Each structure stands twice: as structure tokens, then as C-alpha cells.
Image (cartoon, rainbow, N blue to C red):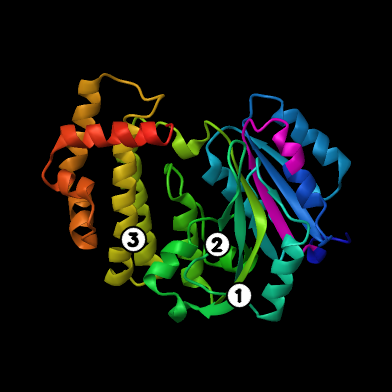
């Protein structure tokens, strides 16, 4: 490549103790049919072989740049990559995932042909112990181009869940100062996307899967969080702040998000009875009792008015039945 002006897409890959999976990930990016890319690997203080693998990959291809930094979490790692990016568009790939060969050529061509600030595609969730699952936007029947006014509340909440399925015009991200939130363990991508979508003029969607998301046994999907209530409340605050900033604080959008708050609350109860959960039953009981009395959660349940027996138990502060249901559900799903 002749220089920064020729880079069409900067691909940011945050890495923390990924090991050998990193080679498959980076290989899939370097094998893209779109040649004019740069790969920014942000080593977030890895303590395993990942650090050396990053340096080895940098030596093999001039399009790879490695940034080593202390461990501060995926949000700050991605933000570091954004500041270093030189491409016309920016994309993100998680270090244990991989992408199809034509992903960035298809997304970039769509961005240019439709003058879109953001382009999104579908994904496929890959497991090491069960069949693949398609990950599509169910509310959109086919590929399309949307303006902000066409992104209604429930569609925003469905589309905003993941940054890795998108490319973003760098001018939009830098000019609007869109960043991933630090100090939040949940909904980082959603907060980033709510801001980015809110500032974008056009968003294009391709209803085809190009991204492969790998979920390993013991991954963060079913990871135990000892501070889950605090985690979901911080995520809720972050989302509400983003809606205030980029969506005029719309009550309709905020009320729609409360469905996520409710889902996270039920997950927090299940979390206390995961196989790797710690603490005595009395300690878990107290956490769930506190959740049942949390004003933000009680408000979310009232707003969404979902017909779920567990939510009625929360409103009535029936902690023991909630514990029993969580134990049964976790056993059923092998958690």
C-alpha cells in the first residue's frame, strides 16, 4: 500500500490471552478479498503466548500493526485502536472469532454505493459443543438502507447489540467522539452503537452472514459475576445516557430498553446459581433480595409489563421461589 490514504478499512482486534485462536482470526482478516486494509492488534496486557504471537504476525505482513498496553479491558483496547486507525472505515473483530473472505469488500462496497456512514451484516454463532446458530436482524426481512428516523425503538435495540458486525466511517466516530465506555462490563457495544447510530446519516444492512462468532465452553456468556447487580445497573445508566446524548432522551426508546433491564435482572438471579458461583446460600439470598428491592428494576418491570411468573415474584419480593426457579433453569441448561 502506498500510504494511509489508500487504507479503506482499519480492522481493530483487541487481544487478551487468546492463544493459538489468534492466528485463525488474523489469518481470516489478512485473507480478505479487500486488499487495502490495516489490522491493528491491541494487546491488552496478555500474560500468555499471545504477546509473542502478535509480534510474529506483525513481522509477516506489513498491514499489521501491534500496540502493546497494560490490561485495562476491551473497551479501552478498542478505543486505543480507534485513535490509531487511518482507514476510511473502521471495523472490529474479536480475537477468537473469524470472518468470511468477502466480508470487508462487501461492506465497503455497500458503504460507498449507498453513501452509508455505517454498514451492518449478519453473523453465525459457532460452538464447540453444539450446532451453529444464525444471528440475523429479525425485524428486517432483507437488505436495506435506513435513515435515523426509520430506526424505531425495538429495531435500534436489536441492531445495536454488537460492534463486530459493522463498519463505521472513521470521520463519524472521530468527529462525534464516539467511544466504548470504560468501567462497564455489560452493553459496551450497545452503548457505542446507540451513539454511532444516532449520529449517522445513513445505515446500510446486508442480510447475509460474513462474521463467525465463536463461543467456547466456559466463555463469558455463562460466566459468574459476583457483582452482577452493579454490572446491570451501570449498563442501564450507560444506555440511558447514550439515548439522552444521541436520541434526544426519547421516552419511547428508553422504555423499550427496559426490556433489556428486565432480561438482565432475570440473568442476574440465574447468575447466583451457576456452577462456578461462590458464596453461601445466605449470601446469594441477600443479593437476590436486594435485586427485588432495587427501584430501577421494579420500574423496568412495571414499564414492560411482561407476563412472566419470575417478574411477579420479584415484585412480590418472593426470594425463595426465585432461587428455586434459578436452580431448575440452570440445571436444565447445564450451567
In x, y percent, where is residue 294?
Answer: 18, 44
Residue, disc 3: 257
Mark 3 element type: helix
Identify the mark at residue 233; answer none if there is no mark.
Answer: none
Label 1 to label 2, Cα distance in Å?
Answer: 11 Å
Name the mark nearer the viewer: 1 or 3.
Answer: 1
Q: Residues within 10 Å of mark 2 (few under 14, many from 20)?
A: some
Seen from the viewer's position, the closer of residues 161 and 195 is 161
Q: Is 291 placed left or right of 16 in the picture?
A: left
Q: Residue at x 89, y 61 (%)?
A: 2
Any magenta on residue 22?
yes
Question: Where's the C terminus, which quadrant?
Answer: top left
Estimate the spatial distance between the alpha carbons at disc 1 and disc 3, rounded to whole Å. Answer: 24 Å
Q: Secondary structure at mark 2?
A: loop
In contact (CB < 8 Å): disc 2 and disc 3: no
Q: Foreground: 165 or 48? A: 165
Q: Which residue is mark 1?
A: 143
Residue range (magenta): 7-24
Query: Going 38% across and 29% down the picture, which residue do you hit?
Result: 274
Q: N-terminal of the two: label 2 or label 3? A: 2
Residue found 30% across the figure and 31% down from its top: 327
Say whether residue 47 is visible: yes
Amino acid at each position: 500500500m502506498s500510504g494511509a490514504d489508500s487504507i479503506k478499512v482499519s480492522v481493530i482486534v483487541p487481544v487478551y490471552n487468546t492463544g493459538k485462536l489468534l492466528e485463525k482470526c488474523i489469518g481470516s482478516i489478512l485473507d480478505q478479498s479487500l486488499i487495502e486494509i490495516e489490522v491493528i492488534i491491541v494487546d491488552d496486557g496478555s500474560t500468555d503466548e499471545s504477546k509473542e504471537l502478535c509480534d510474529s504476525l506483525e513481522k509477516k505482513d506489513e498491514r499489521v500493526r501491534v500496540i502493546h498496553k497494560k490490561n485495562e479491558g476491551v473497551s479501552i483496547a478498542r478505543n486505543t485502536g480507534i485513535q490509531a486507525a487511518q482507514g476510511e472505515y473502521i471495523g472490529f473483530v474479536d480475537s477468537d472469532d473469524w470472518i468470511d473472505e468477502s466480508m470487508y469488500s462487501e461492506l465497503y462496497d455497500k458503504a460507498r454505493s449507498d453513501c452509508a456512514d455505517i454498514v451492518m451484516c449478519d453473523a453465525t454463532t459457532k460452538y464447540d459443543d453444539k450446532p451453529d446458530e444464525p444471528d440475523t436482524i429479525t425485524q428486517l426481512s432483507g437488505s436495506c438502507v435506513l435513515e435515523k428516523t426509520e430506526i424505531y425503538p425495538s429495531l435500534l435495540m436489536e441492531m445495536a447489540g454488537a460492534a463486530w458486525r459493522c463498519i463505521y466511517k472513521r470521520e463519524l466516530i472521530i468527529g462525534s467522539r464516539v467511544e466504548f465506555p470504560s468501567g462497564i462490563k455489560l452493553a459496551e457495544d450497545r452503548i457505542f452503537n446507540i451513539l454511532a447510530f444516532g449520529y449517522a446519516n445513513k445505515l446500510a444492512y446486508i442480510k447475509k452472514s460474513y462474521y463467525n462468532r465463536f463461543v467456547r465452553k466456559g466463555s463469558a456468556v455463562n460466566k459468574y459475576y459476583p457483582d452482577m447487580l452493579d454490572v446491570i445497573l451501570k449498563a442501564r445508566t450507560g444506555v440511558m445516557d447514550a439515548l439522552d446524548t444521541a436520541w434526544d432522551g426519547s421516552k419511547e426508546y428508553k422504555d423499550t430498553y427496559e426490556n433489556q433491564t428486565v432480561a438482565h435482572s432475570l440473568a442476574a438471579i440465574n447468575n447466583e446459581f451457576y456452577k462456578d458461583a461462590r458464596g453461601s446460600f445466605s449470601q446469594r439470598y441477600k443479593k437476590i433480595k436486594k435485586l427485588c428491592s432495587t427501584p430501577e428494576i421494579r420500574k423496568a418491570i412495571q414499564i414492560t409489563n411482561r407476563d412472566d411468573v419470575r417478574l411477579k415474584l420479584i415484585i412480590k419480593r418472593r426470594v425463595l421461589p426465585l432461587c428455586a426457579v434459578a436452580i431448575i433453569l440452570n440445571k436444565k441448561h447445564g450451567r
